[in-house]
Image (cartoon, rainbow, N blue to C red):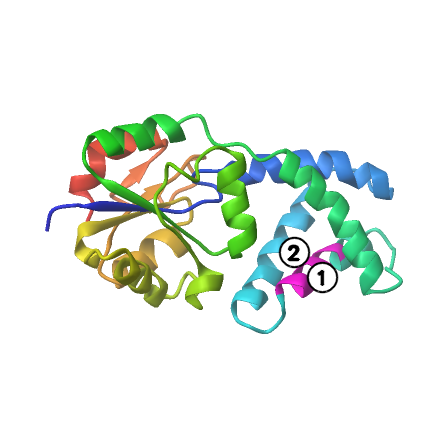
Amino acid sequence: MTVQGVLLDLDGTLLDHEGAVTAALLRWLPTIGVEPTAPVRALWAAAQERHLVDWRAGRITFQQQRRRRVSDLLAAAGRVAADDAELDTLFSGFLEGYEQSWAPYTDVVPALEELRRAGLRTAVLTNGIEAQQTDKLARIGLLDRVGPVFTAETLGLFKPDPAVFAEACRRWGLPPGAVVSVGDRHDLDVLPARAAGLRAVHLDRDGAGPHDEPHRVASLAELPGCLHAAA
């Protein structure tokens, strides 16, 4: 089946999420008396992943996962927050720095333009919440460029459930076999997409692998040339 559309992930694919997180932590942590060392930043990343998994599974709310990330950080520093209000206030300091650091990767706009010239439709599928993810795209100048934006919050389904890919394609009006999923997470953007009948390309910006993935690119600049080979 001919490729008609490219379904793009957002964080780590279009937006430099890790760069924004690092910049925010370097700015925020000293304001709460925590040195922004590499181990502390790694602890934050691990807490983020752990609690987002619980949120996607419906075990906690989105606000609770934010509070738990701050609570874990404070515990590692030998501190305890007084209450949820303090956790919310502390997280708002991180969030301010994170939002101010949002930026697209330099390969994004040229790739979108090349896909458009090739007659391919694009859309975004992201695990984030609707308000924040559309705000990201608007602030980095991509909201009017990427086509429809499908968020897990709106669909009621989360990656890595293959059903979220099938539902995005249904709402987009394209058969799964005519869509290529592109994202930086092999476990979230590639394997479940294929399970739903889409083609998939792994955007492996840091070369972490898996190296036996046959459809792997290091930059979106490589994407247009490999779409029709992806399966």
Q: Which type of secondary structure does the marked residue at label 1 adopt?
A: helix
**Which residue is depicted at the point 87% across and 56% down?**
79
Q: Amino acid at mark 2?
A: Ala
Residue identifier under label 2: 47
**Magenta region includes residue 64:** yes
Quick check: 21 above or below 84? above
Residue 224 seen from this side: yes
Which residue is more in the foreground, 3 or 44? 3
Query: Is mark 1 in CB contact (under 8 Å) with mark 2?
Result: yes
Magenta span dominant secondary structure: helix
Which circle marks residue 68 in the picture?
1
Q: Position of residue 24 (x, y in %)?
A: 69, 37
Quarter assignment of residue 119: top left
> What residue sits 21% from the left and 55% below the top?
174
Could you tell which of marks 1 and 2 lies nearer the N-terminus?
2
Residue 118's image quarter? top left
Left or right relative to 196: residue 26: right
Label 2 element class: helix
